[in-house]
Image (cartoon, grey):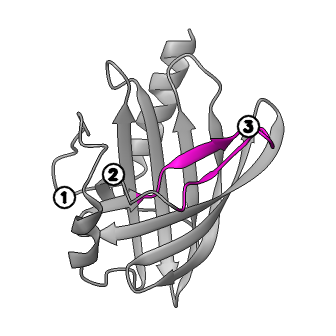
């Protein structure tokens, strides 16, 4: 039943993003060379876009991001839906400068509210994120500032984020 609910939720999130191109899955492209990020054209001006990342042994772990960017302000939704585990669902707010996005993800997990700062870069039809790291002292995740942009989301189409 949980698998069915996960599948339905992921389908609804993906369906909320319309696309003129084929929807693609991210088979094993979750790692990208950080040198690719610097060649990206500035693409974060007044746009609404949706992105998808699938991971895990059978690509059953799904993360979706819907972004609306207007006048350098970013709002959106981010949902992390790991297979048969507790999900994280919430909102993104932040700023965009050129192709770089600094956002805060406010989410719920297991009935608890939490936040994580995210570093993202728009690169063509991809959204690339610095990975998260776990801090054993605080018991929380945070963006790994020392890492390159290695988590790659593929665009699924124009978003429908309410502005």
Q: Is residue 125 left or right of residue 162?
A: left
| Residue 25 appears left or right of 67 | left
In the image, which residues are magenta? 129-145
Farthest residue, direction bottom: 71
Residue located beneath label 1 in the image: 20
Q: Is residue 93 magenta?
A: no
Q: Residue 70: percent from the left, percent from the top?
A: 50, 84
- Quadrant in which the N terminus appears: top right
Q: Nearer the viewer, mark 2 or mark 3?
A: 3
Compute the Cα span from label 2 to label 3.
Answer: 25 Å
**Residue 118 in the figure: left or right of residue 140:** left
Asked if the stretch drawn in magenta spans residue 138, the answer is yes
Return the mark for residue 152: 2
Q: What residue is at 60 percent from the left and 68 percent from the top?
A: 103
For residue 78, above or below residue 61: below
Position of residue 45 measured from the top left corner of the image (x, y, whole percent): 40, 86
Binning the other alpha carbons within 10 Å of mark 3 as few (below 14), some (14 to 19) or many (20 upward) gives few
At mark 3, the secondary structure is loop
Q: Dots 2 and 3: beta carbons under 8 Å?
A: no
Q: Which residue is mark 3?
A: 136
């Amino acid at each position: 039943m949980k698998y069915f609910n996960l599948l339905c939720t992921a389908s609804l999130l993906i369906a909320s993003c319309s696309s003129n191109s084929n929807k693609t899955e991210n088979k094993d492209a979750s790692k990208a060379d950080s040198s690719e990020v610097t060649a990206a054209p500035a693409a974060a001006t007044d746009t609404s876009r949706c992105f998808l990342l699938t991971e895990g042994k059978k690509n059953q772990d799904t993360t979706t991001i819907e972004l609306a960017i207007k006048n350098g302000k970013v709002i959106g939704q981010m949902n992390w839906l790991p297979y048969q585990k507790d999900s994280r669902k919430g909102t993104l707010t932040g700023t965009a400068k050129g192709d770089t996005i600094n956002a805060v993800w406010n989410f719920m997990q297991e009935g608890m509210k939490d936040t994580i700062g995210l570093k993202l870069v728009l690169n063509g039809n991809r959204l690339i994120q610095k990975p998260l790291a776990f801090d054993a002292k605080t018991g929380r995740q945070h963006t790994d500032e020392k890492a390159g942009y290695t988590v790659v989301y593929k665009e699924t189409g124009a978003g429908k984020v309410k502005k």
